[in-house]
Image: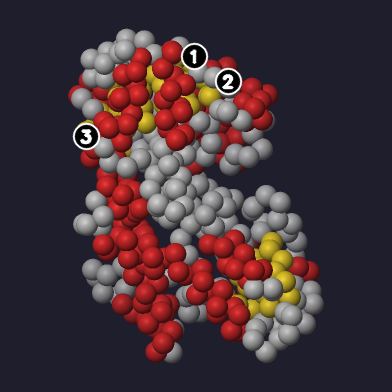
Amino acid sequence: MANKKIVVIGTGYVGLPLAIMLARAGHQVIGVDIEENVVNAINEGVLPFAEEDVRKVFQETDVRKNLRGQRVPCEADVFIISVPTPLEDKKRIADLSYVVEGLKSIIPFLRRGNLVIIESTVPPLTCRQVVAPIIEQSGLKVGQDIFLCHCPERILPGDTFKEIVYNDRLIGGVDPRSADMAREVYSSFVEGKLYITDDISAELAKLMENTYRDVNIALANEFAAVADGLGVDIMHAIGLANKHPRVNILQPGIGTGGHCIPKDPWLIKQVDPVNSRLIYTARLINDEIPFKIAAKIRHALREIPSPRIVALGVTYKPDTYDMRNSPALKIIDLLVQDGYQVQPYDPLARNYRWGPIKELARDADCLVALVEHRVIKEELARDEAAIKKAMRHPRILRFYQYPGGA
C-alpha cells in the first residue's frame, strides 16, 4: 500500500496511539489537538501521560520522523476523527460537539478523493445524519467525492499497544469503496481481522460490545445484593454457579467506570428507548453501586467517632492509570460529603502519593481497598498483620474477594 498523509483529529487515549501506529507503518501523520501542551509533547518527543509501551514505540526512529503535532488541520489523504463523545449529564444523550467541531475544522482542507474515518463512539445513524451533512458543507458529495467510514476503536487502557495491533476491527463504510479505502489504512498496522460492514451496523455493534458487559455486570451486582440479604458469600456462590458448563457469571464490583461502559448503553437508549428497557435497568443498577458501597463503609464505622479512612485505589479498575468515571472516586466523594476524613492513595494514578501500606495506614481507623491493583493485593497479603498493628482501629474492608485468595 502506498503511504498516505493522514490527519488524526484528537490525540488523547485513542487518537495518540493510533497516530503513533500509523506513523510507525510509514504514513506521514499529523496529530491535531486543541491542547498546546499535547502538541508540544508530541513534537518534543516527551509523552509523560502515555503508557510505557506507547512511549517506547513513540521513540522509534520511523515514528519520530513521520509524526508531528499541530493545533490546526491541513490538507491530507485521510482524516480520522478520534475525539471524546461524553454524555450530556441531564439528558443522558451523546454530546457530539467535539465530533462536530472536529469535522468543521477539516472542511477547508477536504479535497475530492479524501477519506474521512470516524473512530469516536457515536449513536447509530450519526455518520449519515450528522457527519455526512457537515462534510457536504464543503460542496463535496459523500460517497461520490468524499468517502466516509466508521471504524470504532477497541482499546483497553493498560494494554494499548497489544489491543490496537491485535484486536479485530470493524470497518463500517457508507458504501463499498469507502470500506475498501479504510481497510487499506488499517491493514497497514492491524494484525487482527478486519470485518467489512456498513456504517450503521458498525455504530451499533460498538455500543453492543460495551452494553453486553454492562448488563452482565449488573446481573452480578444484583446477585450480590440478593446474597447480602441471605447472608451468603456471593463469590463462593458465583464459583459454584460457574461450575455449570454454560454459565459464566461475572464478578460484582464497586461500580462500572472508564470512558465506554457507563456511557455506551445510553446511546442505544437514545435511538430506541422502547426496546432498550433491560439496558436502561442495568445502567440504573450499576450507577447505584457506589452509593451501596459507601453505605457499607459507613455501617462498618458506625461506632467510631470521626473516623480516619484510608482509601486504596482511585482508578476505574485494577492495574490501569485511567481515572475516567472512576466509581472509587465517586465513593470517596460521597464519604467526604458526609463529613468523613478520607485520604486516597494509588500507586498508578498521577498525583496520588504512594508508599508502604503500613505507613499509609498509620493511625487510621479503617483501610478500604477500593481498587486492588496487583501491588495492593501483594502488600495486603504479605503485610496484613503489620498494617493492622499500625492502625488505630484495625479494620480492613475489601469487596468481593474470591474465597482463599488475596
Q: Amino acid at mark 2?
A: Gln
Q: Residue at x 43, y 13 (%)?
A: 109
Q: Quadrant of the C terminus?
A: bottom right
Asked whether disc 1 touches disc 2, contact meaning CB atoms under 8 Å apart, the reply is yes
Identify the residue under disc 1: 74
Q: Is residue 79 above or below residue 202?
A: above
Q: CA distance from mark 1 to mark 2?
A: 9 Å
Identify the residue under disc 2: 70
Determine whether, in the image, residue 204 is placed left or right of residue 307. Answer: left
Looking at the image, is mark 3 or mark 1 nearer the viewer?
Answer: 1
Q: Position of residue 365 (x, y in %)?
A: 72, 80
Identify the residue under disc 3: 197
- Give the number of callouts: 3
Q: CA distance from mark 3 to mark 2?
A: 32 Å
Q: CA distance from mark 3 to mark 1?
A: 29 Å
Res 33 → quadrant: top right
Determine whether, in the image, residue 104 is placed left or right of residue 200. Answer: right
